[in-house]
Amino acid sequence: MSNSKKYLQEELIRISGVNPKKCMRCGKCTATCPAYDEMEYHPHQFVYMIESGDIEPLLESESLYKCLTCFACVERCPRSVEPAKLVEAVRLAAIRKQGNNRLTANDIPALLDEDMPQQAIVSAFRKYTK
Amino acid sequence: MQRIGVFVCWCGTNIAGTVDVVAVAEALKKEPGVVFSANYQYMCSQAGQDLIKAAVKEHNLTGIVVCSCSPRMHEATFRKTAAAAGLNPYMVEIANIREQCSWVHKDVPTGTEKAIILGKAAVAKVNLNVPLTPGESPVTKRALVIGGGIAGIQTALDIADAGFEVDIVEKKPTIGGKMAQLDKTFPTLDCAACILTPKMVDVAQNEKIRIFSYSEVTEVKGFVGNFDVTIKKKARYVKEELCTGCGACTEKCPMKKVPNDFNLNMDTKRAIYIPFAQAVPKVATIDADYCNMLKNGKCGVCSKVCAAGAIDYTQKDEFISEKYGAIVVATGFNPISMDKFDEFAYNQSKDVITSLEFERLTNAAGPTAGKLLRPSDGKHPEKIVFVQCVGSRCDACNEKGKEYCSKICCMYTAKHAMLTRDKYPDTDVTVFYIDVRTPGKNFDEFYRRAVEEYGVHYIKGMVGKVIPDGEKLIVQASDLIAGKQLKIDADLVVLAAAIEPDKSARPLATMLTASMDTNDFFTEAHPKLRPVESPTAGVFLSGACQGPKDIPETVAQAGAAASKVIGLLAKDKLTGNPCVAQSNEMMCNGCSTCERVCPYGAITYEDKEFRMPDRSTLIRRVASVNPAVCQGCGCCTVACPSGAMDLKGFASEQIIAEVDAICK
Amino acid sequence: MQVKEYKPLIVAFCCNWCSYAGADLAGNNRLNYPADVKIIRVPCSCRVNPTFVLRAFQRGADGVILCGCHPGDCHYTSGNYYTRRRMALLFSMLDYLGIERERTRVEWVSAAEGAKFAATMNDFAEKVAALGENKRLEDLRCKK
Amino acid sequence: MQKINRNVLVEKAVSLLENGTVCCVLGWKKGEFDYDITPAVFTTKEDIEANFVFDDFCGANFSKYLVQKTRKAEGKILVFLKSCDTYSFNQLLTEHRFDREKVYAVGIPCEGMVDINKIRAISGEGISSVECGEKITVNTIYDEKFEINASDVLLERCESCKSKLHVAYDELIGEEGEVLESNRFDEVAKLEAMTPDERFAFWQSELSKCIRCNACRDVCPACTCEKCVFDNPKSGVENKAPANEFEEKMFHIIRAFHVAGRCTDCGECSRVCPQHIPLHLLNRKFIKDINEFYGDYQAGAEVGSRAPLANYTTGDIEPSEVFDGRGE
């Protein structure tokens, strides 16, 4: 693993406070994930790819913004790995880069519609912006 | 003053090559107490030993120091030599001048100098040695087996076979345990009842074996060879000696709505019941929680129909005291509760069941007479999903499950899947697994047959949740190899629940002072070399109380535990290690610190009367060590604040003398 | 610069089941370590009373090392756990009194670790030798 | 909390004695000087009324006396316990050193006892009389008179009082206090921060003052052994008289280790030391280490608690790790 990859890996582990090595690869996180169909990479892949240092594809992936942070995976993981916290860490790593805000104030008006609870937009804005 | 002889061994050139043995012998001759010193080529040879024996006689020696190889090598040899010469064997000390001197140092001056110091330390110690005699205690030639499952049954049969009396204490009304509830056994698929019930009958008919069914151990006192055990025979309201097991009472009992625990509460029994047809002893038991006669005095039907007059509503719990030489723990296991696993909807749907419940559903003597029917509506399930590792292999901080692998689930799930496909080929059977673990004779072959011959779908991935939806159960799971999330409409979901030690094990371990691990499995005396013994002398382990096990392993361990028991009971007297702790009562404070650190429960406290200088008497609490139980680690000697506790053979004075000799 | 080669005096307490056997194995494999190390056999490391350690220092030992089975492997199941607590506290106290902490050590050596035993003794002897003679805990009265 | 009056205690003692609840009373009486208040056993009303003392010099912890006294007494013994004394009381019960049934314990509030040495530092030598009141009035043979606030001359152990809570009693006089945030480990930490050479010099100068009078041992409520190791020729550490400075060090290390995990930090050792050696700093070092290594433990806080040295966990700190993270 190159140094930069290793650095990124350690950073993610530090931010999330999760030890991906505890994973026994049962896939219960993915089995339980309600956003499965939306995601390119699934919770167990987040855990596995971070453990193996293959993090770039995750940073690029739309999956980051499909995770609902519902914590079903955290709740049900038999090994207490907490995949959602890793997803959150990758998301932070992505949006913390210059110009990588997922959502800007300018995007908001377009998102406003009758059916969308405004609270969802507010929390998305918090979540997807540096 | 001791009269010590020093014997310096050359060990060929092993010692003599780097140590000037003559100089060592000469130097040690000047030490206090030494009256004779000699050197010889091979002290451990017959000639060398004869030399020692002759010197003991000629010089009236009271102590011996042999400067030779490690005591781990020849201490026993030289102790025998001393004994043959009429000396107490514990008057021998070894100075290890081979492994810890000549072999690790290069030149003669260094080696010689160190050998002399090691010799001096040994002489200093022998000067303070006292003759030790191993304690002897008689052995009660009877064994107690706690638990009447296959482990307990096999152990009892093997012990009885060797001619010793055995009592089995079983808390349920019948022996048989979990195996009696099983349908078929892997990997041979022979029927559990067919191989177990003959053994149960053997137990019943063996005149060396007594069964205390519906009984519990409530108190254990004593030590190896001499346990005093109190057994509570719970009131079953039926006179065991009169009941013929005809079953007339159970047919006529009007109270029909009693949950049948033998069938895991999937059907009901009567308030007076015999758990199953082949129960041993085949004696009825009244469930006091449901019997109308016992609850409000209105009924008495069973008493009227009992031709033998065995019913006794006034029966009370009975306490029996018995002596035993050895105790075997065979308390077995239970599946863990599924209550905390909400995601699998166990409490929401009757059609989500555990594997043990599945066993009852497929058992000819079970609630469905062996037909595989859904508990909810009695329909035949067309699609069955098995989930492995439910509650096994969890993280330590996961409160729902257990950290360990339950070991038997992979195989019984393969068995269930295979049998289902065999009997009902129209059924679709899917198994979700994380890993399939099949180490065991013919185990992997068995699993492969389930897949290849019987067409069971094995999918790598865990089930995320089970959602009851009308008559169906929607199983949401991941197929990790295909990279897909699956939603299966199942009719029946079977959970391979982790197994845990029986709840009765923890209080029992306290009574026995036997140690347990954090999972409440009994700890073995040594994980590799003494796997069927508890660290507490005289307590042995059989079956799943020591760790998850399948039937062949359990039977093997049961036999091994029995052979250890037989080895113990075959002795008329137990001779212990004489190097045990001893408390000086005059100095003992009675503070209990030693009792707390003793890993064997060898220390007890008693109130003792002392005569004071002014002729008054004083009653003080003092420690006493049971030499038959003490293993001689010496932990108590350091814990003791007053120094009242000392270790024979490694007394504080002796060790200090060694320190002084080395530091001179 | 030291003119005369100084030889430290080291007392090693070894438990009978693991470390003493480990020392024997070091011998079997002819692994050298300084002759300054003298071993005293005890049934279990938990037999070592802090007074033995102090006595050794008092009588002129320059270093004292305790060796026992690895935690969890004690022949007597729990002895070395008590040793660990007792010695952690004792050594911390000695350090508090200004006695060099390098003069005391606890090491877990199994019966299979002959090489570890030799390496440990080499290292310990070297460290103690570097400190020089133990003046701080020496009892002048007892010296000849 | 207000200071308690002698008369309240006298009344209590007399009434318990007269109604037969107790057969004798452990209390304080005047010694040779006003300031050396000593423990005493009272058996009559008259004796109590005449000689029972309670003032700012009643530091003595009576727990230890119960070990011998309960053995001989026919009935119950009345003992007055300050909050710090109750910890020793419980610790002795944990070690089964006396029969709880034979004691009637009365908890008394305490605002701290004073240190005569600190008074001397103000008044100089030659104290002829001391009177305790709102202020402490000190007269000297040089006809000097000093008025001193008790709170300015508290015993070290009272300055750093760990608890005003009584953990054991049959009856409590006055209000109950609570466990306090204490700065009692500050001095230990200061020593730990020194270099080994500085520490050695500190202890050498302190311990070489020791005259081996054994007062620290004799007063210590944890030192109730039937036979003390220092008096036992077979213990290997028998040692009755001072020989050189190491002997003193050896004596004090062994003594501190003997009470490690059992010492309630009652401070009696330092109070009675005629050479004013800060012996509590040895005991507190063990307490501090125990708290840091194995979690907070207060000996005597509850009866029957398992002393840290008679306990373990599989994940305990290794002796080699003890010094990690402690700088240097």
Image: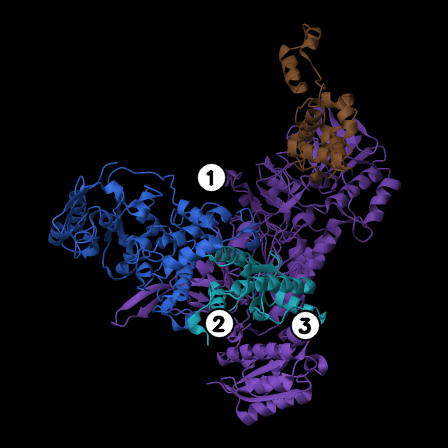
Chain colours: A brown, B purple, C cyan, D blue
Dot 3 falls on a residue whose secondary structure is loop
Do tags 1 and 3 sit on the same chain?
yes
Q: Position of residue B469 (x, y in %)?
A: 72, 22
The residue indicated by pointer 1 is: B297
Depth check: B31 or B327 in front? B31
Which label number is shown at residue D244? none
Asked if B326 appears above or below B507 in the picture, the reply is below
Chain that bears disc 3: B
**Residue B656 numbered tag:** 2
Question: Which residue is disc 3 drawn over?
Answer: B104
**Residue at 57% from the left image edge and 36% from the top image edge:** B255
Observer-side mark, 2 or 3, equals 3
Rounded to the nearest angstrom, the CA distance separating label 2 from label 1 is 75 Å
Say whether residue B556 is left or right of residue C46: right
In the image, is B661 to the left or to the right of A51? left
Which sits in the foreground, B11 or B648? B11
Q: Position of residue B462 (x, y in %)?
A: 74, 34
Report the amino acid beneath label 1.
Gly
Secondary structure state at the residue bearing disc 1 = loop
**Circle 2/circle 1 CB separation < 8 Å:** no
Question: Callout 2 environment at 10 Å: few (<14), some (14 to 19), or many (20+)?
Answer: many
Whether discs 2 and 3 lie on one chain: the answer is: yes
Is residue B175 depicted above or below B259 in this figure? below
Looking at marks 2 and 1 on the same chain, the residue that comes earlier in the sequence is marked by 1
The chain ID associated with circle 2 is: B
Dividing the picture into quadrants, the one containing residue B477 is top right
Residue at x-position 49% and y-position 41%? B294
Would you say residue B566 is visible in this rendering? yes
Q: Residues within 10 Å of mark 1 (few under 14, many from 20)?
A: few
Label 1 resides on the chain identified as: B
Query: Residue D194: image x %, image y %?
Result: 46, 50
Q: Secondary structure at mark 2?
A: helix
